[in-house]
Image (tube, rainbow, N blue to C red):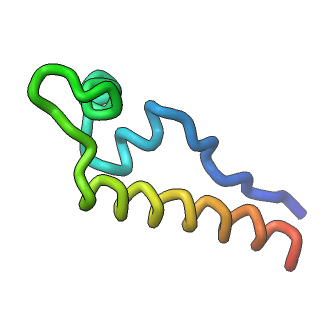
Amino acid sequence: MSIELPKLINKAELARQLGLSPAQLINKLKGTQRNSFTDADKEATIRALQKAVEEVEGLYSK
């Protein structure tokens, strides 16, 4: 039996899940180039992290 590991959550993967480039995410986090991390970004980030947690928890329930 093979275990499928979830993707590692790093800035590049998080940016991809938010529909941004890694540079755009970094600018939003730093608040540079007229970008700011919005409430919508916060909610999308929380959803992405919760999904990752669920995937890891699923490894232990098999």
Quarter the C terminus occupies: bottom right
- Residue at the spot 34% in from the left edge and 32% down from the top edge: 29
Residue 28 position in % (x across, y down): 26, 33
For the residue pair 3 and 42, the one nearer the viewer reads as 42
- Residue at the spot 32% in from the left edge and 25% down from the top edge: 30
Image quarter of residue 40: bottom left
Name the side, left or right, on which 34 lies relative to 11: left
Name the side, left or right, on which 13 lies relative to 38: right
Quarter the N terminus occupies: bottom right
Residue sitting farthest toward the left = 34
- Residue at the spot 74% in from the left edge and 62% down from the top edge: 56
Residue sitting farthest toward the bottom = 61
Name the side, left or right, on which 31 lies relative to 15: left
Residue 35 position in % (x across, y down): 16, 33
For the residue pair 8 and 38, the one nearer the viewer reads as 38
Residue 11 position in % (x across, y down): 47, 33
- Residue at the spot 26% in from the left edge and 59% down from the top edge: 39
